[in-house]
Image (cartoon, rainbow, N blue to C red):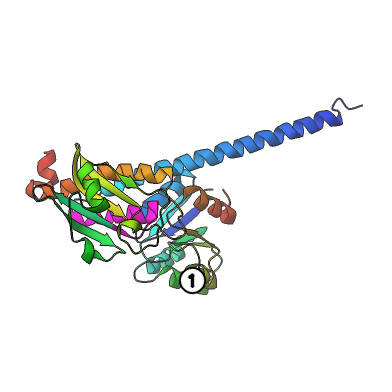
Amino acid sequence: MRKKILVADDSNTALMMERTLLAKSAYDVVVARDGREAVKQALDENPDLIILDVVMPCMDGFEACRELRRLEATRAIPVIMVTTRGGGDDMENGYEVGCNDYVTKPIHGPELLSKVRNLIGE
Amino acid sequence: MSAYTEEYVQRLLAENERLRLLVDGLKAESEAQVSNLASLYVAVTSVHGALDRPSVLSSVQEIVTNLIGSEEMAIFETDAARGRMTLLASMGIEPGAYQEISIGEGAIGRAAATGERLIRQEGGSLTDDADAALTACIPLTVAGRVVGVLAVFRLLPHKGRLDAIDIDLFDVLAAHAASALLFTRLYPASDGIGGATA
């Protein structure tokens, strides 16, 4: 059975890129445009993995991740954070709120796919 | 006695390992190529996905941030009659100094005057001098005519330098962002999509 990944980003370009890469690697993809929608989609769709951009309107990636970890139904879903910052605060905050891994922008397909596979397999 | 000697088994195991590494290498190479093609596809689709100028400019900014790796950029439109360029949009820079630039002035103006892209391979300069902070000046051209310039300043701190795919993305932007911007200028005066395709 194909695994399902929820991708949350407010950038059309980032969403299209991530969606294209993941779909080509035989994952099903559902999308959200902000953190609040990501939490709702996670509850509705029960994805195998969630990819969360840090900077999003309504609810940012950190807050969304914290909420996902708080909710019983989504607590165990692996989360990869996406950030434009290669180290420092974003990374620390990400691990603090419970993300499993992170990737940096610009989006690098092989790196993203490798981290996805590490967490949920092919 | 087994027909397979220890030496024969070891040779097969070594060959197996060699082929495994070869397959892994080919897989990684193909994944990198798919990723590069995806970047180009996404860039072209994004810039042509809008009818209005703010959306096209926003797409260009998103491409530079998400696919190339910079949050400091400016997009100019040329006015050949006045010999000037006007700032259309910017991000992460102080726009005051870039509101209007003469064609031929500085690196940005030079790119507009010559139609030649200017790329600093090492990128990431931290100097305060505006031109020294530039990583790339990409003339946006339609049918050989420069209609604008995309100036990319410092790359994201973890992005050390531009890669081959970044140069390909600049080429895509040079052609497609130019025609998309030109289209947004012409579209309001047209009869809209319905009229154009009827």
In reply to whether residue B64 is colored magenta, the answer given is yes
Q: x, y percentage for residue A26?
A: 49, 45
Give me the residue at 17% from left, 50% from top.
B103
* Front in this rendered view, residue B55 or B103: B103
Q: Is residue B162 left or right of residue B118?
A: right
Q: x, y percentage for residue B108?
A: 25, 52
| Chain containing the residue with disc 1 | A
Marker count (numbered): 1
Amino acid residing under circle 1: Asp
* Front in this rendered view, residue B81 or A51: B81
For the stretch drawn in magenta, the main secondary structure is helix
In reply to whether residue B129 is colored magenta, the answer given is no
Q: Which residue is situated farthest in the bottom direction here?
A: A70
Q: Which residue is situated farthest in the top direction here?
A: B3
Q: Is residue A38 left or right of residue A116?
A: left
Q: x, y percentage for residue A97?
A: 51, 72
Residue A3 visible: no
Q: Which residues are magenta?
A: B49-73
Give me the residue at 52% from left, 39% from top.
B29
The quarter of the rendered structure image containing the N terminus of chain B is: top right
Q: Is residue B107 above or below residue A71?
A: above
Give me the residue at 54% from left, 73% from top.
A96
Q: Can you tell which quarter of the image residue A75 is in?
A: bottom right
Q: Can you tell which quarter of the image residue A118 is in?
A: bottom right
Residue located beneath label 1 in the image: A89
Q: x, y percentage for residue B152?
A: 32, 54
Give me the residue at 60% from left, 36% from top.
B23
The quarter of the rendered structure image containing the C terminus of chain B is: top left
